[in-house]
Structure formats: structure tokens, C-alpha cells
Image (tube, rainbow, N blue to C red):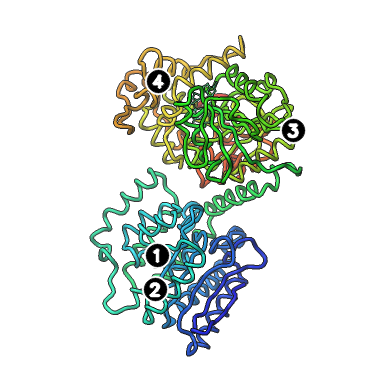
Amino acid sequence: MIDYSRDDDGVVTLTMNDPAQPANTMTEAYVAAMSAAVDRLHAEREQVTGVIVTSAKKTFFAGGDLPTMYRATRADAPALFKLLSTIKWDLRRLETYGRPVVAAINGAALGGGLEIALACHHRIALDRPDTRIGFPEVTLGLLPGAGGVTRTVRMLGLAPALTTWLLTGRRFRPADALANGLIDQLAATPAELIIQAREWIRANPDAAQPWDRDGYRIRGGLPAAQLPAFPATLRKQLKGASLPAPEKILATAVEGAQVDFDTAQVIETRHLITLLTGRIAKNMIGAFFFDMRAVNGGLARPRVEAPPPRRVAVLGAGMMGAGIAQACAEAGLDVVVRDVTPELAARAAGPGITTTAEVAALAGCDVVIEAVFEDPALKQRVFAEVLPVVAPDALLASNTSTLPITGLAAGVQRPGDFIGMHFFSPVGKMPLLEIVVGEKTSDAAVARAFDLGRLIGKTPIVVNDGRGFFTSRVIGTFLDEALTMLAEGVPAPSIEHAALQAGYPTGPLALADEVSLTLMQRIRRQYEAATGDGFERLPSHELVDAMVDKHERPGRSGGRGFYAYGNGKRGLLWEGLVEMATPAGRAVPLEDLKDRFLFAEALDARRCLDEGVLRTAEDGNVGSILGIGYPAWTGGVLRFAEQHDDFEGRARELAARYGKRFEPA
Ligand code: NAI
């Protein structure tokens, strides 16, 4: 579990290497091994000149043991307290060992991994592009409880600790972690990492933590002067939502800053246990598990052999095509991007990417990802153009966000190889990949799309074909609900506020502007044409039409929508909305507004499941959180329904007040 080796210079290297898992985590076995290693260090102290902590895995240390955390109930609180106290005790014995201790961070150090590193006197990180360093705990409804809050506050001062590291959940590249103060040095190669660690040990025989030195004071001083600012900072960071983890992190940091180190650690443990045994952390960890299971392909990936991707053709060098090309190139794939002119194609240029206007340049590509305009005839035409030159069994993927895959495949030869690979914008940042299976799509094609998604670091979900698949359809439902509220006369600021309060990352009117009202109008008109007489025209449709056609406010890309835009930034809500809205007959309570968003999406996701668009509830949960901003505290859109105390009762209540769409399935 932890390999202990001492060399002739007296430097002990502790190499973490859990034989039972792909990554090191804080299992009970690990905790016992750490205790034993620290015991041995103390027993052999006379022969030891310094300690290097590193890992034999690709990652340094992955963090807490989520299965244990997920199972924890209130009855486990005493056992958790003991476990956390042991972890802290051993890290404390390490940092007060009286010999220099260096963390040689050879790969990702997240959560508990960073906490181990912080208990060392010096941190050197291997500077690789895929290494991430940070505290993702807040995104799981938790706080860094192995000394992470206590040490970060003491290392950086309260405000930077909270606003850069603890409350954001951000995962920094090594150079950014260095700039933000928790990493001290970078190493270019694994060999240099160890050499630099040894040099530091030699140069710093008297190493100690700053807080263990005389006269230490927290940088920036004690919080009294800063306190009044924190609740506001927190509200800003949370966009008004009220969630327990950030509040507990704030409390841990502020309370801990006013007492001695050891008391601060106990405060931290107590707050973590409250979170661990509560429901919200469970939901958030649960969602993360679904994610991991989806990632590992347990359910979604068909169990068939599939050749790995090598050379990818991307059609269209627009916003999506360029992003997809870059993601593929960063994963080491050979990428060729084609657009109609060399100049347009060149917008996607970058390391590992060839750009072209010539079809012939795509010769031999074994994957084609199409990202041209959202026009079915054009999409079919570009596939027809490239089919003669690409590999005869190439995977044919469309990044369409709304067009049914079966319909597109019908106009393309080899529908068995045709599939939807729906990426999200911005491609580099958004973790989800929605794989859309048409009627004739083969299992091998699904497996290939899945493997490609994994290779470029995305979390794939696999859904069946349908209008808007899963994500575009359900996000459409969310936007429709907001527009319906607006048409009812609910003031726009209240709509935005309610969504943020419910935990959505962006207000629906801001989101509608991003999507573009023109696009929403076009998609609805296509649907209207396809539906014929059965189409029901709603007040929300009038509203969008008026915005686009009468007021010429088409959304963000057009410079004005529900909001004003200037200098690339979102400004204020448009004041004309006040006159557009008919005054409501009655005020709609905030709780109803929040629930209307959460329920409208949950009910539609249920219908997706009933109609077979979703194959599993897990795909819906993962897709809703990672793709369309459903609040993470719920654990996902279907889990929200499952866990609600009285989902059907409340849905019926909403149906009686606001319309049939809330009738439970
Ligand atoms: P875009 O307008 O930025 O880019 C489209 C590109 O296709 C342009 O560069 C255009 O010159 C090129 N193109 C047109 N005809 C071509 C041809 N015959 N051969 C090669 N290239 C050609 O559009 P965007 O936003 O990148 O969207 C592309 C696709 O991705 C659409 O189907 C869209 O629905 C889908 N999508 C868009 C998302 C978004 O957030 N914008 C999200 C997910 C999917």
C-alpha cells in the first residue's frame, strides 16, 4: 500500500501504491498503512534525513474513499470522527517530524491528495498538461476534511484560500497551482521531480510548517475586519443558491482562523461529518458515481470489440468544429479539419491539426465528425462528398444538436456506421458527450463513439434518437417554462432569481440568449411544420416571435436579447420586458417558480425514459448535471423525482395551478 524505502543518504521515499485500485484513495487500508509508515519514520528517526512522498500510480492520490462516504449515515458519525482524526493525527506527525518532508506530485492531486501534499513542507509538481490540482470537494457537497481547509487558510490567508481554492472546486494545471500559491516548484520530468525533491531536502534540514514557527500569523490577519464581506462573497459565488457545503466551508475557515491549529482541525472534522451524513452530499456523490460508472462503460458501452480511433476528419471549422478538433488533437489524434475555404478552415488551426478546403485531404480518416450548419440537406451533402475518400469503414458522426439521427442517416450510405456525437459548447470545458443511436446504428459504432469520447476525456451517455435527443429536449422544456412564466406576467428578474436559487448555474433568460431566440424559433417552426394541425401554439411562442421579429432582439450573438450586451459582456435585463408582459393576476410564489423548473425537467426526463429516448435513469442523471445545468445537489433529474418526499402530490398541485404539463406520468 505504501512502499517505504531508505537510501544511503537517509532519504526515505514513501511511495503510495494501492494494489487493489487503479488510483490511491483514503480507504481504511490506506489509513492503516499511513499510520504504520509514520510510526516507522519515528522509530528510525536517527537514520532519516528527509522524506519524499510520491506515488507509483499515474495520479498522485485521488482523494477520499467515496464508497465509504456514500454509505455513511448518522450512526457512523463516531467511526467517521475516529477515522478522520487518525488521518489528521498521522499527517500532523509527518509535518512535525523534524525532518524535511517533500511531496513529489507525479500526477493529479485532488482533494485528499492535495491535503497529503499540504502536510508536507514543500510541494513539487510534475508539469504535465493532464495533471490537475485542486479541491473538488465542494462539487460533491463536501469540504476538504483532512486538514485541507485548515492548512490552505494558514498558507494563503482567508480570502485567497476561499475564493481561489476552497469554494470554487477548481482543478488547476500545475503552473496555475504554482501561481495560486499551493505548489512551490515545478519539475519537467519524473526523474527531475525526484532530483529536485532531494535537493530541497539537502538545502532545508530545518524545514517546518509556517504555522509551527514562532510568531506565525495568518496572512492578511484575522477575519474580524474581513468578516462582513464574506457572506456577500459567498452569495456571489453561489449566485444566490443556498447550499450546505459552501456554507460549511466558510464556517470552517472563519471559525478555524480564530483558534489554534489543532482546534481548527477538530472544527473541520465536525463540519465535514455533518455534511457527510446529510442528504445533499449523498446526492452529489451519487451523481459522481453514476458519472464514473458511465465513464467506465459499465452500462452504456456495448460489449463489442472496436478499433481505436487514429485519424479524425472534422467537417466545419466553426465554433464547435474547432473545439472538437482541438480536443481530439490534444488527446494525440491526427486531425484534419475541412471547411469551404482555406481561410475558414484555418480558424481551427492548432498543434496536431491540419486544415484544408480539399476533400482529398481527408483520405484515410477512420472517423468523420461533422459540425457544419444545422441544415439536414447540407449535412447529408457533406457526408456524401467525403465518403469516397475516407476509410471504407469510417465512423460517421454528426454533432447536430437537434436533428434526428435516423432521418440524417437515411440520406447517407452505410447507416450502420452513422451516429450522433453531440458535444457541448465550449467543447474544451464541457464534460458531457451525448451519443445518439439511430434506428440502424450498429453496436460497434456506439462502442467506437464511446471510446473516442473517453479518449478525449469526455463523459459519454448513450441515448436513443428522438427530437432533441435527451439534453436538447429537456433544456428546451426548461426554457419553455421560463418563457411561459414571462408570458404569464412573472417579472423577468424573479424568473432568473428563482432558477439561480434552485441551484441552476445560469438563469433561463440568459441561457435563451446564449442559445439564440432565432434558433429556438426555427426549431419550433420545423416542429410545427412536422406536426401539422396537432401543433398547439402557446403564449411563449408569441413571446419569442415578438422578441425576434418585432423587437429585433434575437439573443446574444445578435448583440441584444432578453439582456443587453456590450464589450462581450452580459448587461442588464431589457426594460422593454416590463411592457411586454401582461401583469399577472396574482403573484407566483418563489417556491412554485423554483419547483416549476425542477419539476418540468424531471417530468420530461421521465417521459424520455418511458419513450425509450433514455435507456437508463443514470444516463439522465449524468446528462442533466454535466450537460444542461440541472442542479448538482439533486443528484440528477430523475433522482430528484425519486427522492422528493411527495413528487406526485406536488406535481399534481403544480398541474392544478399552472397546467397539464405537470400531470405526473
Ligand atoms: P458555426 O456556424 O460556428 O460553424 C459551422 C461551420 O460549417 C462554418 O465554419 C461553415 O463555414 C462550415 N461549413 C458550411 N458548409 C460547409 C461544407 N460544405 N463543408 C465544410 N464546412 C462547411 O456552427 P456551430 O455553432 O459550430 O455548429 C455546428 C453544428 O454543431 C450544428 O449542427 C449545431 O447544431 C451543432 N451544435 C452546436 C452547438 C452550439 O452550442 N453552437 C452545441 C452542440 C452542437
Where residue 113 is drawn, which disc sits there? none
The nearer-to-camera label among 3 and 4 is 3
Label 1 – label 2 distance at C-alpha:
30 Å
The nearer-to-camera label among 3 and 2 is 3
* Residue 662 shows up from this direction: no
Residue 515: x and y in percent read: 46, 27
Furthest residue toward top: 533
Please give the name of the residue rendered at 58% of the width and 60% of the height, measured from the top-left corner. Answer: 58
Please give the name of the residue rendered at 48% of the width and 90% of the height, measured from the top-left corner. Answer: 46
Label 3 – label 4 distance at C-alpha:
39 Å
The nearer-to-camera label among 4 and 1 is 1
Depth check, front residue: 262 or 307: 307
Q: Earlier in the sequence, mark 1 or mark 3?
A: 1
Please give the name of the residue rendered at 49% of the width and 88% of the height, measured from the top-left corner. Answer: 47
Going by the numbered disc 2, the residue's amino acid type is: Thr
Q: Earlier in the sequence, mark 3 or mark 4?
A: 3
Going by the numbered disc 3, the residue's amino acid type is: Ser
Residue behind mark 1: 185
Residue behind mark 3: 442
Furthest residue toward right: 304
Label 2 – label 4 distance at C-alpha:
56 Å
Residue behind mark 2: 263
Please give the name of the residue rendered at 52% of the width and 45% of the height, measured from the top-left corner. Answer: 330
The nearer-to-camera label among 1 and 2 is 1
Quarter of image, res 302: top right
Residue 390: x and y in percent read: 66, 30
Depth check, front residue: 578 or 329: 329
Residue behind mark 4: 554
